[in-house]
Structures are given as C-alpha cells and as structure tokens.
Image (cartoon, grey):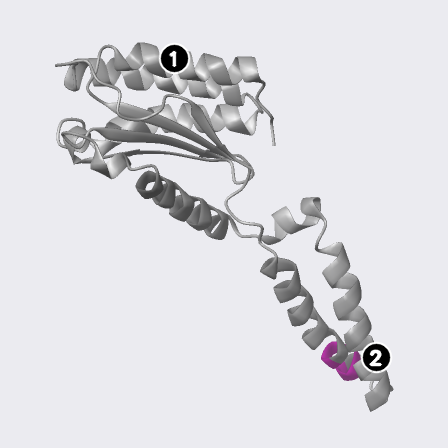
Amino acid sequence: MTLLTESELQQVAEAIERIERDTDAELVTVLAAQADDYRYIPLLWSSLLALLLPGALLFFTGWLAAWQLLLVQWLTFVVLALVFRLDAVTTRLIPRPVRHWRACNLARRQFIELNLHHTVGGTGMLIFVSEAERYVEILVDRGISSRIDDSAWQSIVTSFTADVRNGQVLEGFLGCIEACGSLLKQHVPATHERNELPNRLVVLS
C-alpha cells in the first residue's frame, strides 16, 4: 500500500474543506489497502490442482501405485498452498471480476457505516479507493443523484483509477476532489453552512 504521510492526509482534508464551502454535499474519502485478504484463493487453487495432477499422471504414465498417487496429491497441495500464499502470486490468481466485486461491496459497506445515507437532504458522497484492486468508485445519495447523472462521475473515476495504477494516490485524490467539487458547486450549491461528517481521509489497513 502507498502510505500517505500526515502532511498528505492533511492536504486531502483541506481539499475537502475547500469544496464543502461551496456545496451542500457532505464529502467523505476512504482509502483501503485491499478489499479482502483472499485467504481462500490459494487453498482453492491448491486443492483443485492437487485433485487433477495425480489423475493426469496416472492417465499419461499408468505406473503409479495408489499410495504414490496419494503422496503426489498431498505434496502438490502443500507446496502449491505455500507458493500461492505469496502476494505476487495470489494477486494473479484472483479474477478481476472477483476483486472488483469485493471492492464494490466494501465501498457500499463504508457508505452505510460512515452514515453517508443519513445526511440532511441526502447529500452524502463517498470517494472510495481500494489500492490492491486498483478500484475507484464514487457513491452519492439521492440528494445528489437526483441532480447529477451517474455518468458524470465516470471520467473522474477513470482518471483517478489511472493515478492509483501508477502509484499516485495523493495526486489522484486531490484531482478527484477538485473535479467533483466543480460539479457539486454547479448542481448542489451551498445553501447554508454545515459540516455533518469529518473531512479527514479514512484509511483502512
């Protein structure tokens, strides 16, 4: 995970504070190291290959005894389970739809847990990033979605995702907040001064 310093976290908080002066939206940012530990993935692949390999050996060679096939199966499972636990290997074993599905679920849990659905006028907004999955999502409550079409956020998300992929998490957050602020200022302008939710960047390790 690209750790942000206290100074960088403060930059994000200050950017949110500047945006909220011009809009009724309540903006919260969340940075997760990863959406899931995926501990079941190495075991799943190891079990599958351990089941297939002895059968393949018996089919192509025909000379292995039952106890030898069982030994091969055990050794295959143990070795692969250890190898597949390496982060660099595990990441390649997880299909992108699975990674994005887990990140998507975490984003929605954070929206609820941070009470973004309980703001006055339904103007809660979440900018969510899961770094390991290279996943970015913007979630808004009904008070914003009724004024700004969801498609308006897509280019912002695409740009931010590219920044995360390049390891430029801070730059991505600041650019995303500014871009969102421009839309919010136009469509959800400030009508009164308030600050229902904290402006800090929430970091999930």
- Please state which amino acid type lies under the numbered disc 2: Leu
Percent position of residue 10, x then y: 48, 14
Magenta stretch, residue numbers: 55-59
User: Label 2 to label 1, Cα distance in Å?
Assistant: 60 Å
Label 2 packing within 10 angstroms: few (<14), some (14-19), many (20+):
few
Q: Is residue 32 left or right of residue 157?
A: right
User: In the rendered structure, which disc, 2 or 1, sits on the residue that comes first in sequence?
Assistant: 1
- Please state which amino acid type lies under the numbered disc 1: Ala
Label 1 packing within 10 angstroms: few (<14), some (14-19), many (20+):
some
Give the quarter of the image for residue 20.
top left
Give the quarter of the image for residue 139.
top left
Residue at x 78%, y 69% (from the top left corner): 76
Residue 176 is at least partly visible in this image: yes
On screen, residue 116 above or below 190? below
Residue at x 52%, y 40% (from the top left corner): 133
Q: Quadrant of the N terminus?
A: top right
Q: Which residue is mark 1?
A: 15
Of residues 186 and 57, which is closer to you in this image?
186
Of residues 131 and 109, which is closer to you in this image?
109
Residue at x 58%, y 18% (from the top left corner): 5
Q: Which residue is mark 2?
A: 71
Q: Is residue 91 magenta?
A: no
